[in-house]
Image: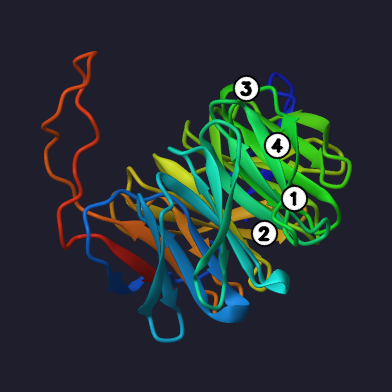
């Protein structure tokens, strides 16, 4: 276990970590891979533990996997530029955020058939369902706001200005939604019922936060930042509890309440940082597990404790943009897979 030392020039708590892993029982590794055809890019994965399903975004469609068998059971098509998937089991309804068409596709969870489509803001990226308010929230990167949808009716209820570029979000189960604001290095707290921003928390020296996860019981947020650190924030006081070093290229974070572990998936390093929550205000790095370079997006099954990450190998970029910079390299056919970590 490390000591927490207060540094006045930062006015936050900095974690000093032991050289050895604290929890010898933590031993995550890639145990299997679910290979998927195609050369499309990808973004978020969403796990639905109650239904034993995993939803994987793939450019213009969503692949649905039976996690009990690790096999594909269907697809949701017509989701142009899909980023994320939100699941509202109580309404038998799912939602996808389609960044290129600025829309949300609404689909039936049992049949996977599309039930409708509604307009969102510009470039809807992350999308989550809040079970407390029965609402779906999209986080729109270009218009810097959130589109709010009634999960039962599929109707758009309003738009919440966020004052910056939103990344991923999470809900506390009691009427509040928290979203990382990437370009201001903040977390915005949203009232999910009244549809307004209540507070804004600076998480500097964390820079460009992307993934976020929540420990609901202890009111703690874990935000993965691009300067290779995870910030740990107390949502009651609004204060940073600790900074934890992680790998490069973080995109997703997760929290497993059953094991009191937080995770950061680091795509550039090809690692998974595993952080043990010892008690409120005390944390330790339990493991840095090898995954695969490009494995940046992640989903956690809180029942089986399995972790899923999308990854692929890339060819050389051949198309140049107007500015002379190479575009994203193409995915090599036959290399895309969902990694199963446990």
Q: Earlier in the sequence, mark 3 or mark 4?
A: 4
Task: Say if mark 3 contacts mark 2, CB within 8 Å.
Answer: no
Task: Say if mark 1 contacts mark 2, CB within 8 Å.
Answer: yes
Q: Which mark is drawn over residue 254? A: none
Quadrant containing the N terminus in the rendered view:
bottom right
Q: Is residue 101 visible in this depiction of the protein?
A: yes
* Left-right relation of 111 to 327: right
Colour logic: rainbow
Q: CA distance from mark 3 to mark 1?
A: 20 Å
Q: Could you say which is closer to the camera, residue 65 or residue 294? A: 65
* Left-right relation of 319 to 68: left
**In the figure, 291 relative to 162: above or below?**
below
Q: Position of residue 56 (x, y in %)?
A: 42, 61
Q: Residue furthest bottom?
A: 69
Q: Residues within 10 Å of mark 1 (few under 14, many from 20)?
A: many
Q: Could you say which is closer to the camera, residue 181 or residue 278? A: 181
Q: Is residue 262 visible in this depiction of the protein?
A: no
Q: Which mark is drawn over residue 184? A: 3
Q: Could you say which is closer to the camera, residue 73 or residue 256? A: 73
Q: Earlier in the sequence, mark 2 or mark 4?
A: 4
Residue pictured at 67% horizontal, 59% vertical: 277
Task: Say if mark 2 contacts mark 4, CB within 8 Å.
Answer: no
* The quarter of the displayed image where residue 203 is located: top right
Q: CA distance from mark 3 to mark 2?
A: 27 Å
Q: Position of residue 290 (x, y in %)?
A: 33, 59
Q: Residue furthest top?
A: 323
Q: Which mark is drawn over residue 220? A: 1
Q: Which mark is drawn over residue 277? A: 2
Which of pointers 3 and 4 indicates the residue nearer the eye? 3
Q: Residues within 10 Å of mark 3 (few under 14, many from 20)?
A: some
* Residue tagged 4: 5
Which of pointers 1 and 2 indicates the residue nearer the eye? 1
């Amino acid at each position: 276990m490390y000591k927490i030392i207060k540094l006045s020039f930062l006015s936050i708590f900095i974690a000093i970590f032991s050289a050895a892993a604290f929890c010898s029982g933590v031993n995550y590794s890639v145990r299997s891979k679910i290979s998927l055809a195609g050369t499309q890019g990808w973004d978020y994965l969403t796990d639905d533990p109650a239904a034993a399903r995993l939803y994987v975004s793939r450019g213009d469609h969503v692949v649905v996997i039976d996690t009990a068998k690790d096999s594909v059971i269907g697809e949701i098509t017509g989701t142009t530029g899909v980023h994320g998937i939100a699941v509202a089991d109580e309404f038998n309804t799912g939602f996808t955020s389609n960044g290129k068409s600025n829309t949300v596709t609404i689909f039936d969870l049992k049949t996977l058939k599309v039930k409708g489509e509604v307009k969102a803001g510009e470039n809807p990226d992350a999308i989550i369902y809040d079970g407390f308010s029965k609402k779906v929230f999209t986080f729109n990167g270009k218009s810097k706001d959130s589109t709010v949808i009634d999960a039962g009716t599929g109707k758009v209820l309003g738009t919440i200005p966020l004052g910056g570029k939103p990344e991923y979000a999470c809900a506390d189960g009691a009427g509040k939604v928290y979203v990382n604001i990437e370009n201001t290095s903040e977390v915005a707290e949203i009232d999910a019922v009244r549809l307004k921003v209540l507070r804004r928390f600076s998480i500097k020296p964390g820079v460009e936060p992307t993934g976020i996860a929540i420990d609901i019981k202890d009111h703690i947020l874990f935000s993965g930042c691009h300067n290779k650190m995870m910030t740990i924030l107390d949502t009651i006081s609004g204060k940073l509890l600790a900074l934890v070093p992680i790998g490069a290229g973080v995109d997703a974070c997760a929290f497993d309440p059953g094991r009191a572990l937080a995770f950061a998936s680091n795509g550039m390093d090809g690692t998974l940082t595993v952080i043990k929550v010892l008690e409120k205000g005390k944390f330790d790095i339990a493991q840095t597990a090898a995954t695969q370079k490009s494995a940046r997006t992640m989903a956690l099954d809180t029942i089986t404790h399995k972790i899923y990450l999308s990854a692929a190998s890339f060819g050389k970029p051949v198309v140049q943009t107007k500015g002379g910079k190479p575009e994203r390299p193409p995915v090599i056919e036959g290399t895309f897979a969902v990694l199963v970590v446990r």
